[in-house]
Amino acid sequence: MTSILLPASHEFETQDIFVNMGPQHPSTHGVFRMVLEIDGEVVRDVLPYIGYLHRGAEKLCETMDYRQGIGFMDRTEYLAAFNAELSYVMAVEALAGIDVPERAQWIRMILCELNRLSSHFMFLGAFGVDVGVLGTSFTYAFRERENIFDLFEEICGDRMMYAYFRVGGLAWEVTDNFVTRVNQVLGMARQGIADLDGLLTQNEIFQARTRGIGHIPAADAIDWGMSGPSLRASGVALDVRRDEPYLFYPQVKFDVITGTNGDVYDRYLCRLREMHESIKIVEQCLQNLQPGPIVPERMSRLLRTPPGEVYIRTEAPRGEYGVYMVSNGGNRPWRCKVRSACLSNLQALRDMTVGHYVSDAVLILGSIDIVLSEVDR
Amino acid sequence: MRGLIRSFVTTGATFLRKPVTREYPETHRELPERDRAFPLLLWDQQIDEPFCTGCHACERACPVECMTVLMKDNPNHTSQGGTSSRRKIIDKFWIDYGRCMRCNICVEVCNFDAIGMNNTWSGHESSAVDRLDLVMDLQQLLSQSRAGAVKPWIAP
Ligand code: SF4
Ligand code: SF4
């Protein structure tokens, strides 16, 4: 094409430009900054910067005794605080050799799965916004999430920072109408999943935006150390709940949901279908719930652990949430390292994003369900 | 096209449901009994003094060290001709609400059930212009319980 301004023979000297996205960008799901090198609209390179939310929770835990640390674990993973607490208290229990009463374990399982539901609702809502559904999916998802949080608030008094699990069991007994309330919440959650499913899954525009975007092959996903639904979407059936069972997961039946393509759409679909599995698990837990103690009979008030080290991993909504704890015999951990799924999942961001459009970069970041408090801790 | 229609059907069906939102500052949701806002000191209505003996247990157990406790001899103790069986009583008490992380540990360690988590909206709507306004002194911590406005739930 000849231009009237420039002679046809003129060669444009084009250059890639750098665009800074974040740390206060609403689509980065927290405070995350990435520098995109773009050529036109195509991303050529991604340079992520993390650490804006670093609070030194691991180091703080070294100065806290075992009960005080629980509150800090909540804050490392604020969308699924029960799951974070669980890893922490299980690590201490493993160190100290404490047996947790059955009832406490079943309740822990119920709460963790409900927390997974609420976290995935958050994902569905936020992901819809990333795709461009404006606020609709967000409000739908938050409506359901509120129901779950209402239940949590009735049980432990707080909506997000529960501080409810204790080493050895639970802080206090659940409410009397616990079972009916859980069933009620499950019913509402089912409706909410159906709503979001109807709104998004088969929508042609949604599919056009998400299919074939941010593809990562299984081998690469494993190499980057991804876990959770982001890994399972690539076709790797790794689920800590099944492969390295904790609590009573061997006693309940559930399927490990996997995808095939490992693209953004599959990661979305994996989470959506996983929510049905969570509901299944909670229903089975309710059937097994028996009255009984929620803390071991003999629990010393001053908890000391023998020297040793332990690594406990659990399946949090975003993947493997592990706590590596070293004790030197005191009443506080000598070292408490948190292995968070999000940090590992984020490593694959560059592989997933390069070659796609800038607008898809937002989508890809959203599809690994990033929580920056978990990345930075 | 089918998927799009399905989306519209979903939004249409939701449109016909009852709204779940509230006009927040005007109407408040009822809070459950166990709701945890910020810790408050409780008032012993029978003897007309605080339950708190200033034993420092909560201060030591608080993970963020946001409490300051000072105790004194109780002028109302029976040995002084008073009516109380508490030999020591709280003199000064500060809790920095700006630092408190509402973990409930202070309530758990207190042997006298003298502290409890505010379970009313007054605990949630406590924004302040200055951070120092969030440091509550003894009078502020006791006033709500003294007036009978709160009944915190304390885990058995
Ligand atoms: S509130 Fe309870 S634990 Fe704290 S100083 Fe008073 S009596 Fe002691
Ligand atoms: S609730 Fe926790 S952080 Fe707040 S004053 Fe009590 S012990 Fe300290």
Image (spheres, coloured by chain):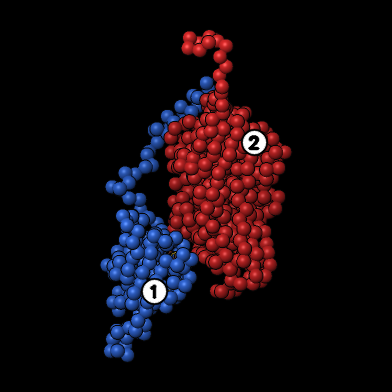
Chain colours: A red, B blue
Provide the secondary structure element on which disc 2 rests.
helix
Q: CA distance from mark 1 to mark 2?
A: 55 Å
Foreground residue among B129 and B3 = B129
Residues packed near mark 1 inside 10 Å, few (<14), some (14 to 19) or many (20 plus):
many
Q: Residue at x 56, y 74 (%)?
A: A302
Q: Residue at x 56, y 14 (%)?
A: A10
The relative height of residue A357 versus residue A318 in the rendered view (above or below) is above
Q: Position of residue A105 (x, y in %)?
A: 60, 59
What is the three-letter code of the residue carrying label 2?
Asp
Instruction: Say whether mark 2 is within 8 Å of ligand 2.
Output: no
Provide the secondary structure element on which disc 1 rests.
strand
Q: Residue at x 37, y 76 (%)?
A: B70
Instruction: Say whether mark 1 is within 8 Å of ligand 1.
Output: yes
Q: Position of residue B38 (x, y in %)?
A: 39, 62
- Camera-side mark, 1 or 2: 2
* Residue A88 shows in this picture: yes
Residue beneath label 2, please? A351
Residues packed near mark 2 inside 10 Å, few (<14), some (14 to 19) or many (20 plus):
some
